[in-house]
Image: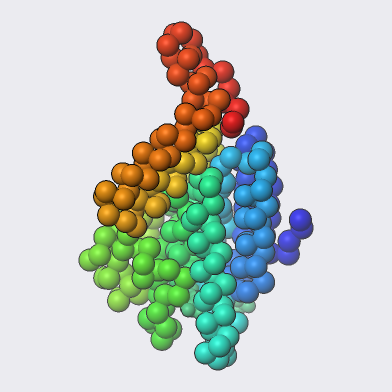
Amino acid sequence: MEFKNVLLKKENGIGYVTINRPKALNALNSETLTEIDLAFDEVANDDEILVVILTGAGEKSFVAGADISEMKDMNVIEGRKFGLLGNKVFRKIETIEKPVIAAVNGFALGGGCEISMACDFRIASTKAKFGQPEVGLGITPGFGGTQRLARHVGLGMAKELIYTARIIDAQEAYRVGLVNKVVEPEELLPEANKIANEILKNAPIAVSLCKQAINRGMQVDMDTAIAFEAEVFGECFSTEDQTEGMTAFVEKRKEKAFKNK
Ligand code: DAK
């Protein structure tokens, strides 16, 4: 499908979703959120895509937040509808059964920081800047920021960043554990590709089940989490890739390419 504000392409097992509204620093209006939603539906249904990279178009911004011009005059009903739309889309990114890497190329503010946090992990360019500036606009983070930031950087740091609305650079984001790696801007997509290709060498169903186990496990008590891990572990033994992976090891040969079966 062709979109106005989102580019979607696939190459060698990787799906690239690029938020493409550079004149507004890729700010998320309702139209863009709806297109991201549809793009992730396509990604979810495309068996040739096994890993996803989410990034922003242009050199300056990943996503500079929810669209303030659109939000400014919203009434309570419209605000709730907008919040529900964003949360639905971000939750889709978080729970899609494929790894999603955020390649953060610039501003990741408000909804931009929040969409990056819905991804499995973040790689940042040295130009990236992160923050939840909402309280300075008279609102609370509305796309999961009060929940996901604390899960990523811990309670105290999340509270400090949200209460102060402070914008941090990529190195600071790395120091507090919000991003896994910081690279020069021209290295950002190559680095994201490199990690995606490392993931692609492994059995896709096992990778996908790991995502589900980690995500679900983080929200429940340890006994429930371990029970779910046992369930997905068992599920692996119904796959051809488990048979091939283990047989290759026992026969001391390199495993054949995994089949995603
Ligand atoms: N929304 C709309 N337009 C934006 C924008 C945004 N978030 N950020 C930038 N733009 C637009 C600018 O208006 C400008 O448009 P023109 O004037 O050229 O038409 C263009 O992008 C370039 O921006 P600047 O001229 O400002 O560029 P600078 O380099 O000078 O500054 C900046 C870059 C990122 C520091 C600055 O643009 C900025 O501060 N932007 C706003 C950042 C921000 O506060 N983001 C958080 C937004 S609040 C909720 C749902 C969601 C949310 C909350 C509640 N519920 C419904 C529950 C989420 C809220 C947010 O994300």
Which residue is painted at 27% across and 54% down in the image?
221
Q: Say if 116 sits above or below 53 in the image.
A: below
Give 42 or 237, whichever is nearer the viewer: 237
Q: Is residue 21 left or right of residue 2?
A: left
Vertical placement of 9 versus 2: above or below? above
Residue drawn at point x = 48 percent, y = 15 percent:
247
Quadrant showing the C terminus: top right
Name the colour scheme.
rainbow
User: Observer-nearest residue: 183 or 70?
Assistant: 70
Q: Is residue 224 above or below residue 78?
A: above
Query: Where in the figure is residue 171, as x and y percent of width and height?
Result: 34, 53
Q: Give residue 149's quadrant in the image.
A: bottom left
* Quarter assignment of residue 137: bottom left
Answer yes or no: is residue 143 visible: yes
Residue 72 % position (x, y): 55, 87
The picture places residue 103, in percent across and down from the top left corner, at: 51, 50
Name the image quarter holding the N terminus. bottom right
How far across and down, in percent of the image, does residue 86 sit? 54, 70
Query: How many marks are shown on the rendered structure?
Result: 0
Q: Residue at x 52, y 19 (%)?
A: 244
